[in-house]
Amino acid sequence: ELKKQGLSVTDEEVEKGLQEELERSGGSEEMKKILATPGARLDNLKNQVRNEIALNRLITKDVKVEEAALKTWFEKNKSRYDKPERVR
């Protein structure tokens, strides 16, 4: 479906997505633990990242958000983001 829509996901985007996943998972040591679980393989993770990027592209390809509308929404909902930083 991605090709039908004229969209693609590059290897560079997959690598960037893997890097983001590494940061979200808690670093390389945590990623090593994840990859050590039965059935977990790096190529499977790459395919998962590629599929997530592709799905996001398909879902958002026709979404247009104007800067002014975005600023207006943010100003109306600013209290949602006025929370102190926390350490996980």
Image: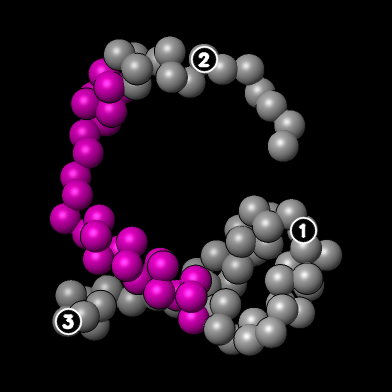
Horizontal relation, residue 33 to residue 48: left or right: right
Give the amino acid at mark 3. Lys
Q: Between tags 3 and 1, which lies in front? A: 1
Q: Is 11 placed left or right of 19 in the picture?
A: left
Residue drawn 43% across the image and 13% down it: 79
Q: Residue furthest front?
A: 38
Residue visible at 64% across and 53% down?
A: 24
Number of marks in the image? 3
For image coordinates 18% across by 75% down, the residue present is 5
User: Disc 1 on helix, strand or loop?
Assistant: loop
Q: Which residue occupies the foreground of this view, 11 or 21?
A: 21
Q: Which mark is residue 82?
A: 2
Q: Secondary structure at mark 3?
A: loop
Whole-number angstrom distance, CA of label 1 to CA of label 2: 28 Å
Mark 2: amino acid: Asp
Where 63 falls versus 88 (above or below)?
Answer: below
Magenta-drawn segment: 47-73
Disc 3 from disc 1: Cα separation? 36 Å
Asked whether the beta carbons under mark 3 and mark 1 sit within 8 Å of each other, the answer is no
CB contact under 8 Å: marks 2 and 3 = no
Asked if the magenta segment contains residue 81, the reply would be no
Residue plotted at (52% across, 15% down):
82
Rounded to the nearest whole Å, what is the CA distance between mark 2 and mark 3? 42 Å
